[in-house]
Amino acid sequence: MPNDLTIAIDLNSPVPVYRQIVDAIRHHLVEGSLKPGSLLPPVRQLAIDLGVHFNTVAQAYRLLSEEGWLDLRRRRGAMVLDRSRPAPPNKTNQERSLHRLREMIAQLQAEGIPARSIAGRLRRLADSIEGSRS
């Protein structure tokens, strides 16, 4: 992985480690700090760097591949694909993602963050997404 990219894992988080890896890499992909053609580190190397089992990293890479972000090949590793145009939404994946969002909101509320604060933050995030599309 390029030197400026970092993945932070919180072993105390209720979010599974493979999901933390997926979310961190996806963030870099969406932000553009990982460009099409970039090679990610081999599964075993990233696992060593993060102090996790290699199957955890492999699972994260597979999920990103299923989302259309990565091309996985033996002996070459994981290469970032050009996803300038997202694939048409798959209803099952869309529902799964919305379910995860609802779970995250419930977790924030369980941690004592008021619903009004969460809603305000979500509105600001939505506005920034809409602003970046124009």
Image (spheres, rainbow, N blue to C red):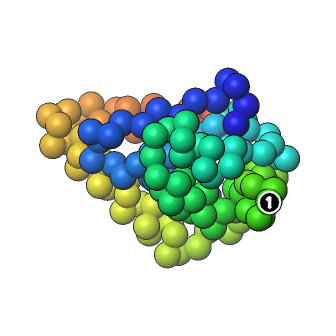
Asked if residue 87 lies left or right of residue 25, the reply is right
User: For numbered disc 1, what is the local secondary structure?
Assistant: loop
Q: Is residue 52 above or below residue 61?
A: above
Q: Quadrant of residue 83?
A: bottom right
Q: Name the residue located 66 percent from the left edge and 62 percent from the top edge.
A: 65
Task: Pick the residue in front: 89 or 34.
Answer: 34
Q: Name the residue located 45 percent from the left edge and 46 percent from the top edge.
A: 52
Q: Is residue 93 above or below residue 18?
A: below
Q: Is residue 37 above or below residue 58?
A: above
Q: Name the residue located 34 percent from the left edge and 49 percent from the top edge.
A: 15
Task: Pick the residue in front: 40 or 30.
Answer: 40
The x and y percentages for residue 29 are 67, 42
The x and y percentages for residue 112 are 14, 34
Q: Amino acid at mark 1?
A: Arg
Q: Is residue 3 above or below residue 27?
A: above
Q: Name the residue located 31 percent from the left edge and 55 percent from the top edge.
A: 102
What residue is disc 1 on?
75
For the C terminus, the image quarter is: top right
The x and y percentages for residue 51 are 46, 40
Asked if residue 103 lies left or right of residue 32, the reply is left
* Farthest-out residue, right: 37
Q: How many marks?
A: 1
Task: Pick the residue in front: 91 or 127.
Answer: 91
**Residue 63 visible to an observer of this rendering:** yes
The x and y percentages for residue 82 are 81, 52
**Residue 133 visible to an observer of this rendering:** no
